[in-house]
Image (cartoon, rainbow, N blue to C red):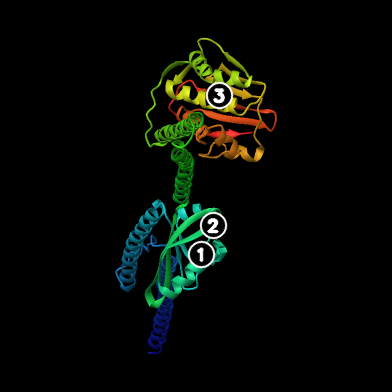
Amino acid sequence: MSLKSREMNILIDEITDRILLLSIIMWAVALALTFLFSSLFSSSVRRLLSLTRRIAEGDFTARAILKRRDELGSLSDALNEMARRLQSLFEQLQAGFDELNAILNSLSEGVLVLDRNLNVKLANDRLIEMFPIEGDITGKGYLEVIRSADLKGIIDDLLREGRVMGRRMEFGGRTFTVNGSSFEGKKGKRWLALVFHDITSDVQIERIKADFVANASHELRTPLTAIRGYLETIEDEEPETRRKFIKVIQRNVERMSNLVSDLLLLSRLESSEPHIRTERVDLHEISGDVMKLVEKEAVRKGLKLKMEVEPGTLVIGDPFLLEQMLLNLLDNAVKYTERGEVKLKGEREKEGVRIQVSDTGIGISPEHLPRIFERFYRVDKARSRELGGTGLGLSIVKHIVILHGGEIRVTSRPGSGTTFTVYLPSSAGNPSRDSSYA
């Protein structure tokens, strides 16, 4: 009996040890599984947190890849779908913004938008071209960008009235008209939008037209007044006096005729599509013809006329206009030279012909050289009218040269004479260069 009891105790001890060992193993397995699940859960949560941060920072291409069927998997799918929709909306907004920018930058007008603090919110490329602006101007005050008292007055009126139309401002030697509107955005924020039109060329054209009308009227009125005065008294005068009056009338009629002819020619040259008849022109031949036209006056004044143009020197251009160009230059040279000589020289160059008309006359002061090709501009107005000049000759010459794709230069010193140099290319009809002086 005692033996059985001892065996029973040994068996119980063995069972107890096995149960304890099994318990330890099960506890260890449970602990390992708990750690594993916790790690997997924590990793998934960290991925989702990283995804939300990237979306919040504007990275709408971010996605979370969680192959789970629990709540974390559903949350991952929802976040991914939200990111896709945000990306689509952002792309649409960006496309609209790019389209708006393209439209604004294609405008020929400058556009400026200011916020309620009068800081720059938006400016298109044209505005930056109009007002030489460097660097990023967004957020800067408008006066820091465009320092203009005229603009400040316009914006003050815009703030007070809510709208301005056709207001003029001067900046950097240019003239602009400004239209502006004030409007409210979201949350009652006030914005100012201004549109700038560069009308400098229009103002210059208006000024030229006004000067032209004034000068033309004056040039026509002077001979008309003389003609009328002599006609009113001619009947009561003796035959000899009448002959003198008639000569004066004829001289003034000729002056008016020349003025009208020059005006018509200048109008033709300045038209939008001037007609030029291009052909091979013998420069030696037309130079000889023009020399004959000014020879009588040159002989009367005791001047030497020289022509140095090689026979067979050819120019491509309009024969009438080229002859008129030479006539105007030679006529001017003879008029303003009292002694010495007037010389016409023409020579071939690599890609064209160079023509020079020089004299030993009174010359031109440096301050007058930049303006001598302007219409009705005269260095000596009284002398020019006395000699029968219209004030359009050199302007006509300049236009003829430009229409033939050439250039004209003038060098002069008071008391030492003047030299006009014309360069004509081998082919005409490419008006790209202008006049200059030295």
Tell me which label, 3 or 1, sits earlier in the chain.
Answer: 1
Disc 3 versus disc 1: nearer the observer: 3
CA distance separating discs 2 and 1: 9 Å
| Residue beneath disc 3 | 330
How far apart marks 2 and 3 lie (CA) works out to 43 Å
Q: Quadrant of the C terminus?
A: top right
Give the residue at the far bottom of this rendering: 1
Residue 261 sits in quarter: top left
Residue at mark 1 = 151
Q: Nearer the viewer, residue 272 or 94?
A: 272
Q: Residue at x 31, y 69 (%)?
A: 78
- Within 10 Å of disc 1 (Cα), the crowding (few <14, some 14-19, many 20+) is some
Above or below, comparing residue 410 to residue 146 in the picture: above
Q: Secondary structure at mark 1?
A: helix
Identified by mark 2, the residue type is Phe
What's the amino acid at mark 3? Leu
Q: Would you say the residues marked 3 and 1 are in contact, meaning their CB atoms lie under 8 Å apart?
A: no
Task: Check if mark 2's residue and mark 3's residue have beta carbons within 8 Å.
Answer: no
Q: Secondary structure at mark 3?
A: helix
Residue bearing mark 2:
171
Q: Where residue 359 appears, x then y in whole percent?
A: 63, 24
Image x and y of residue 194, in percent: 43, 63
Q: Amino acid at mark 1?
A: Leu
Residue farthest to the top, as pictured: 311
